[in-house]
């Protein structure tokens, strides 16, 4: 069952045409009520909608949501039911909640009043490497004497198992990690705060339903297992990475922090923005062959604000359609050996870079390994990597006719090492 809201539909809640949260979106998120309690919410315009309260009052289905850990125990089918009911309650012309001023006041909360937390408790975190322009750029810098892409790259979505325990929401500080590094001209390695802290612009999907031990999720059913997409910043320590990553891949250079946007945007909300991805050559093996377009047209943007600046500066603009491997291909590959996956698992795409320099998804690429530092126009400060006090913000949205379906902002400030 799919539920796609018509592009012309409107809500009785007023929504700015540039808002990421029109009635076409209806994303899933969790807000913090107090130290011990969270509530399941969606967002329309500048209001959070208290889903628990509306279920309690019989205005929404899925009573079981009240007994569970937010969205982690509902199926994709149930999430669609919930969106359908939310749409009906908030569509223009339905007076049921609109004219119930007491309940409306209690169930609609201005977004500025509550902090958002992780949209789901993260069970496992896998990070792919599906951005082909990023993979080529890193190859050129880290292995200049070899072809930029390793021989497997165009045959399978390369990935690694990351650390679920350090997946954090927007607005929490990211502490500069310490690690072991070795300068090219140094005789032996040393240990201390990274000097090359970087962000990685990625998108991810949260699983609604996984597969059992030994089973596979075939590619044509892969998207049906996803609750939706979110923005991901996969923080990285490049000097640590360069020294530690061979032969087994990233380890401590990546596991210290990964931040995700507060909102999981449902697959049905981005369905109108489905596009054909880059041509895959060679043709993937049958288990990775999509039956139709499986990429999405999502504009992505990264901005930095240093402590001396009064406003952020956009440093990169790119698009999720640049990914070589689709989300569906990633999940089909992940489960192709029968490894079980679970509701709440987070799969990130890998850094998304465009072809042009202003569209790269990391500082490593934007400043080309420190050779071309970025200049902050307001203050004249230079940045080769991220410094303490800098705020890195990622945003993303799909552009419809007269409306946007977006992911909000994922924003974190870097704090000195503890
Ligand atoms: Ca990454």
Image (cartoon, rainbow, N blue to C red):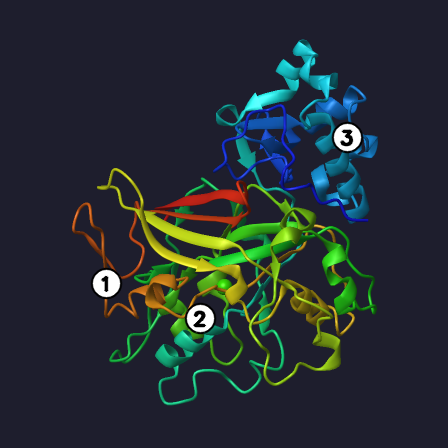
Q: Is residue 192 above or below residue 146?
A: above
The residue depicted at 81 percent of the width and 31 percent of the height is 61
**SS label for mark 2:** helix
The residue depicted at 81 percent of the width and 33 percent of the height is 62
Numbered disc in front, either 1 or 3? 1
Q: Is residue 355 above or below residue 391?
A: below
Numbered disc in front, either 3 or 2? 2
The tag earlier along the polypeptide, 1 or 3, is 3
- How far apart, in angstroms, are the residues tagged by discs 3 and 2? 42 Å
- How far apart, in angstroms, are the residues tagged by discs 1 and 3? 50 Å
- Residue 373 got which mark? 1
Q: Nearer the viewer, residue 245 or 110?
A: 110
268 left or right of 281?
Answer: right
* Mark 3 Cα shell of 10 Å, populated few (<14), some (14-19), many (≥20): some
**Residue with the mark numbered 2:** 134
Q: Is residue 388 above or below residue 328?
A: above
Q: Is residue 388 above or below residue 284?
A: above
Residue 191 visible in this rendered orientation of the protein? no
Q: Nearer the viewer, residue 281 or 60?
A: 281
The tag earlier along the polypeptide, 3 or 2, is 3
Mark 1–mark 3 contact, CB under 8 Å?
no
Mark 2 residue CB less than 8 A from any atom of ligand 1 = no
**Residue with the mark numbered 3:** 66
């Amino acid at each position: 069952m799919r539920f796609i809201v018509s592009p012309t539909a409107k809500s009785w809640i007023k929504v700015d045409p540039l808002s990421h949260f029109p009635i076409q979106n209806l994303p899933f998120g969790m807000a913090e009520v107090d130290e011990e309690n969270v509530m399941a919410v969606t967002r329309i315009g500048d209001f959070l909608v208290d889903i628990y309260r509306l279920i309690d009052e019989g205005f929404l289905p899925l009573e079981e949501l009240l007994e569970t850990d937010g969205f982690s125990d509902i199926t994709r089918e149930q999430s669609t039911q919930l969106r359908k009911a939310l749409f009906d309650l908030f569509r223009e012309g339905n007076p049921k909640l609109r004219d119930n001023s007491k309940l409306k006041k209690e169930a609609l909360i201005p977004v500025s009043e509550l902090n958002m937390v992780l949209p789901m408790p993260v069970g496992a975190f896998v990070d792919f490497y599906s951005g082909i322009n990023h993979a080529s750029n890193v190859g050129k810098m880290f292995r200049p004497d070899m072809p930029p892409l390793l021989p497997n790259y165009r045959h399978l979505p390369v990935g690694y198992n990351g650390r679920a325990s350090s997946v954090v929401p927007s607005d929490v500080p990211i502490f500069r990690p310490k690690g072991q590094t070795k300068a090219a001209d140094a005789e032996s390695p040393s240990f201390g705060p990274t000097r090359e802290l970087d962000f990685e612009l990625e998108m991810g999907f949260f699983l609604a339903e996984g597969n059992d031990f030994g089973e596979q999720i075939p590619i044509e059913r892969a998207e049906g297992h996803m609750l939706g997409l979110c923005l991901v910043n996969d923080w990285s320590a490049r000097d640590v990475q360069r020294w530690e990553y061979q032969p087994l891949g990233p380890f401590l250079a990546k596991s210290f922090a990964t931040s995700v946007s507060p909102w999981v945007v449902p697959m049905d909300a981005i369905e109108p923005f489905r596009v054909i991805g880059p041509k895959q050559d060679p043709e993937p093996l049958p288990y990775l062959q999509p039956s139709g377009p499986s990429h999405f047209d999502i504009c992505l943007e990264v901005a930095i604000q240093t402590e001396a600046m009064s406003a952020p500066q956009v440093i990169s603009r790119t698009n999720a359609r640049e990914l070589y491997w689709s989300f569906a291909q990633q999940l089909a590959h992940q489960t192709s050996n029968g490894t079980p996956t679970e509701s709440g698992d987070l799969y990130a795409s890998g850094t998304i870079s465009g072809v042009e320099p202003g569209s790269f998804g990391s500082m490593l690429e934007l400043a080309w390994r420190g050779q071309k530092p970025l200049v902050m126009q307001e203050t004249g400060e230079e940045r080769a990597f991220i410094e303490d006090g800098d705020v890195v913000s990622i945003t993303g949205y799909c552009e419809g006719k007269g409306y946007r379906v977006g992911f909000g902002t994922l924003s974190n400030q870097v704090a000195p090492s503890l």
